[in-house]
Image (cartoon, coloured by chain):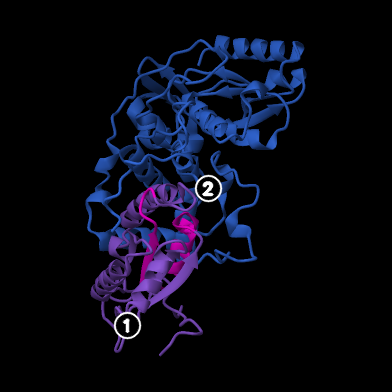
Chain colours: A purple, B blue
């Protein structure tokens, strides 16, 4: 069997798919503002609204990686601004550990990124998404598990727009 | 280990039953195989005669506490006492229900390693005894001396807490300073580039057969129903594919973060010999660096994910 993680060799016409977990109180509203301010950002990002960045269970991130998402972004309120007082502080501790562990097992930290984006930072949201998509574009497709389970095909989400 | 420790333990435990202080006593009994000990869960004072003190304790007895209802007397070594502290921090057990009998630990012997060091099969070992800092092994009519470094369980080699950190009664006995300083951060895997690390772990995760021995033996795994057995929604497929094994192992690691005391049980019971302690050690180092937290040492310190500080690391977030 091939012993190289299949994150090289971009397929023809491949575009990265990035899953973004956005806190409903700030980053989700921030993404909304990006749109209403007519700031363009890469369409590669799929947004999933969560009640708080503290809701982003590490399991969600692992499951997304396992399901073949090329990049993951978790975004919440700036420290001190949490609607639930401390949700983002608690989240920050989990993310700090998770990103170190993912790096240790050999997953590039650029695949899983975190940001603080407030509801008034539409331009920052666009900048963050551009950054994540550019990073993932450079890394190539998430072939982590295709290399492990050669028979397994990464399924396209049913509503993926082509 | 001297018999007097065993006699004292039996007398002690009997007294606990007689005074009505405990409903159960958790200790070790002689195993069915040579150089093996089994856990003993005694509910009557007569059973206490089976209590056995040896150099081959591997199982972490605090594991059974979550299943026993009532007041329990428990025998702990230094490392097991750290598990107790973790369980107390988690609110899983009540201090007033416990009577902790501490056993100063001179390091536990791994018969597999003894056999390797004495260059024989495990079945050929006749007797293993301690003499000063060395281990005396009798194979047939021959006697061999092997060093402690070669024969102790891996986790005992750099043990920082041979003396229990929490106890109501301390048995007499010797405990020793770590025989060897292993600097875990010098684990050569950590120096390798990312792709090689993934190649290594991918191979390890691929071998996992998902027997869940690591989870079942883990004193820190306390969920009554494990997420891998949920099927509505199904987070992790029960099929042992490498991808789901990756999710399972990383998830388990995140769940036991802060309560894993590196007791090494998961790695010891793994039938596929996956080096799980590499992950646990990395996590312990990260928790120390990030949050200045060492699991199972200070009962009054909150668990790392039960608290936060405003000045926690923030530089990895955009």
Q: Residue at x 46, y 45 (%)?
A: B267
Name the residue nearer the viewer: B268 or A46.
A46
Name the residue nearer the viewer: B279 or A69.
A69
Q: Is residue A67 magenta?
A: yes
B208 with respect to B315 (left or right): right
Q: Are marks 2 and 1 on the same chain?
A: no
Q: Residue at x 66, y 28 (%)?
A: B40
Where in the figure is residue A62, as x and y percent of width and height? 44, 62
Where in the figure is residue A34, as x and y percent of width and height? 34, 74
> What is the span of residues highlighted in magenta in the rendered image?
A52-80
User: Which quadrant holds residue B220?
Assistant: top right
User: Which quadrant holds residue A122?
Assistant: bottom left
Where in the figure is residue B290, as x and y percent of width and height? 32, 41
From the image, tell me which residue sits under label 1. A15
Q: Mark 2 or mark 1: which is in front? A: 1
Determine the chain carrying the residue at label 2: B
Instruction: Bin the neighbour count of mark 2 within 10 Å (Cα to Cα): few under 14, some 14-19, many 20 and up.
Output: many
From the image, tell me which residue sits under label 2. B214
Circles 2 and 1, Cβ within 8 Å, touching? The answer is no
Q: Is B251 above or below relative to B71?
A: below
Q: Is residue B269 magenta?
A: no
């Amino acid at each position: 069997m091939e012993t190289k993680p299949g994150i090289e060799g971009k397929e023809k016409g491949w575009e990265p798919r990035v899953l973004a977990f956005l806190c409903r109180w700030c980053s989700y509203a921030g993404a909304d503002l990006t749109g209403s301010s007519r700031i363009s950002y890469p369409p590669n990002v799929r947004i999933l609204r969560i009640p708080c960045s503290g809701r982003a269970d590490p399991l969600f991130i692992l499951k997304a990686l396992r399901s073949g998402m090329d990049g993951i972004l978790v975004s919440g309120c700036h420290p001190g601004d949490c609607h639930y007082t401390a949700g983002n502080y608690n989240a920050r501790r989990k993310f700090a550990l998770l990103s170190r562990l993912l790096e240790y097992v050999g997953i590039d930290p650029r695949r899983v990124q975190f940001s603080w984006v407030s509801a008034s930072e539409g331009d920052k949201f666009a900048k963050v998404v551009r950054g994540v998509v550019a990073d993932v574009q450079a890394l190539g497709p998430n072939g982590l598990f295709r290399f492990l389970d050669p028979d397994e095909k990464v399924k396209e989400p049913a509503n993926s727009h082509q | 280990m001297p018999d007097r420790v065993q006699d004292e333990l039996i007398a002690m435990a009997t007294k606990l039953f007689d005074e009505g202080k405990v409903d159960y006593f958790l200790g070790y009994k002689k195993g069915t195989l040579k150089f093996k000990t089994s856990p003993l869960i005694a509910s009557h004072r007569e059973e206490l005669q089976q209590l056995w003190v040896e150099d081959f304790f591997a199982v972490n007895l605090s594991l059974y506490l979550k299943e026993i209802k009532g007041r329990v007397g428990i025998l702990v070594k230094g490392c097991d006492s750290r598990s107790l502290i973790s369980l107390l921090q988690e609110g899983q057990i009540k201090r007033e229900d416990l009577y902790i009998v501490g056993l100063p630990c001179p390091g536990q012997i791994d018969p597999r390693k003894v056999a390797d060091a004495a260059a024989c099969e495990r079945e050929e070992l006749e007797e293993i005894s301690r003499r000063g800092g060395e281990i005396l092994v009798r194979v047939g009519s021959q006697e061999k001396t092997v060093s402690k470094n070669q024969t102790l369980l891996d986790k005992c080699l750099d043990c920082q807490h041979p003396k229990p950190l929490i106890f109501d009664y301390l048995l007499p006995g010797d405990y020793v300073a770590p025989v060897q300083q292993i600097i875990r951060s010098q684990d050569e895997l950590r120096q390798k580039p990312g792709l090689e690390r993934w190649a290594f772990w991918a191979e390890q995760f691929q071998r996992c057969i998902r027997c869940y021995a690591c989870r079942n033996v883990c004193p820190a795994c306390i969920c009554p129903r494990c997420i891998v057995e949920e099927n509505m929604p199904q987070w992790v497929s029960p099929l042992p594919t490498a991808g789901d094994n990756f999710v399972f192992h990383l998830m388990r690691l995140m769940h036991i973060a802060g309560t894993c005391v590196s007791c090494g049980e998961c790695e010891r019971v793994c039938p596929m010999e996956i080096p799980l302690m590499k992950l646990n050690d990395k996590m312990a180092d990260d928790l120390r660096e990030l949050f200045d937290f060492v699991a199972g040492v200070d009962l009054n310190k909150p668990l790392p994910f039960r608290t936060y500080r405003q000045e926690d690391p923030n530089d990895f977030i955009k």
